[in-house]
Structure formats: C-alpha cells, structure tokens
Image (spheres, rainbow, N blue to C red):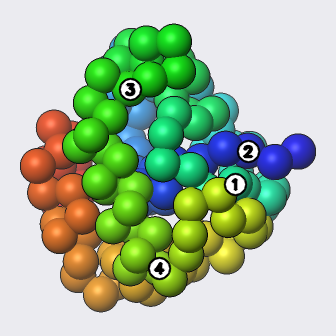
Amino acid sequence: MTYRIRAHHGMCLSFFQGKGYSGAFTENMWKMKERLAQNPEVLLVCGTDDICARCPNNREGICTSSEKVEAYDRRVLSLCGLSENESLFWDEFEALVQKNILTAGRRESVCADCEWNALCQ
C-alpha cells in the first residue's frame, strides 16, 4: 500500500502529541503514524493527503489554508532535495526530514507561522 503524504507532514509527525483540529483528525493522525511506522511506500504531494482525510479544513479535497500549507510542502521538498509526486519509503523520507530540516535547525524557516508552532518548540 502506498500512502499519499503531504511533504510538510514529515515534520508534523515528528512532533505529534495527540492534539489536533478535531477528535476525528487526531484519531486519524495516530492511525497514520502507526501505519507509517511499518515503513510503507509514500507518494509525496503538495495537496491533501491521507492525513488530511479527517481534517475539518479539508473541503472536498481542497485545504482551506492551501496556499500556506502548499508553501510548507514545497519548502520541505526543496530542503530535502525531493520533488512533488516522488515515491520513496517512509523511513527514507523521515530520515531526510530529520537530517536536512529538524537537526539542521531549519524547521522554523518552513513553518514558523503555523498555528501549531508552539507544540514543535
């Protein structure tokens, strides 16, 4: 099974603490975190993904904050040397995000204006 994953969710999952937009969203995020721990193949996207499926900001496949979060996605892809619609295994993507963004101290350059920023400090 290949999961569609927004590029910036590679960072969000590192900091996820069970808080989110709604109970349904949080439950889905936990399930996706468990599934990704099995190292499946992921397709990196700059649009709604399998995590967004239960987000209240997802309006028929379009995020109500699409301009802002698509910019996050594109920054993550750029910093990791990846492209939209590229497929790879989750562990490889997670390692690239860790190395090129989180450990390198670049997270805030990607998403400092996110409403959940305080959780990622």
Q: Earlier in the sequence, mark 4 or mark 3?
A: 3
Q: Earlier in the sequence, mark 4 or mark 2?
A: 2
Camera-side mark, 2 or 1 = 1
Amino acid type at image mark 1: Leu
The Cα–Cα distance between marks 3 and 2, rounded to whole angstroms, is: 18 Å
| Residue 84 location, quadrant | bottom right
x, y percent for residue 105:
23, 81
Tell me the quadrant of the picture where the N terminus can be found.
top right
Amino acid type at image mark 3: Cys
x, y percent for residue 78:
41, 76
Amino acid type at image mark 4: Cys
Q: Can residue 55 be seen by looking at this rendering?
A: no
Locate residue 36 relative to residue 15 in the image: left or right: right
Q: Earlier in the sequence, mark 2 or mark 1?
A: 2
Locate residue 2 relative to residue 11 in the image: left or right: right
Label 3: which secondary element: strand
Provide the residue designation for mark 2.
3
Q: Are marks 2 and 1 in contact (CB under 8 Å)?
A: yes
Q: Are marks 4 and 3 in contact (CB under 8 Å)?
A: no
Q: Could you classify mark 2 by the number of other residues whose Cα lies within 10 Å: few (under 14), some (14-19), or many (20 or more)? A: some
Q: Decide: is 37 above or below 64.
A: below
Q: Earlier in the sequence, mark 3 or mark 1?
A: 1
Provide the residue designation for mark 3.
63
Provide the residue designation for mark 4.
80
x, y percent for residue 58:
43, 19
The Cα–Cα distance between marks 4 and 3, rounded to whole angstroms, is: 23 Å
The Cα–Cα distance between marks 2 and 1, rounded to whole angstroms, is: 6 Å
Label 4: which secondary element: helix
The residue lying toward the viewer, choosing from 32 and 44, is 44
Amino acid type at image mark 2: Tyr
Could you say which disc has been placed on residue 98 in the image?
none
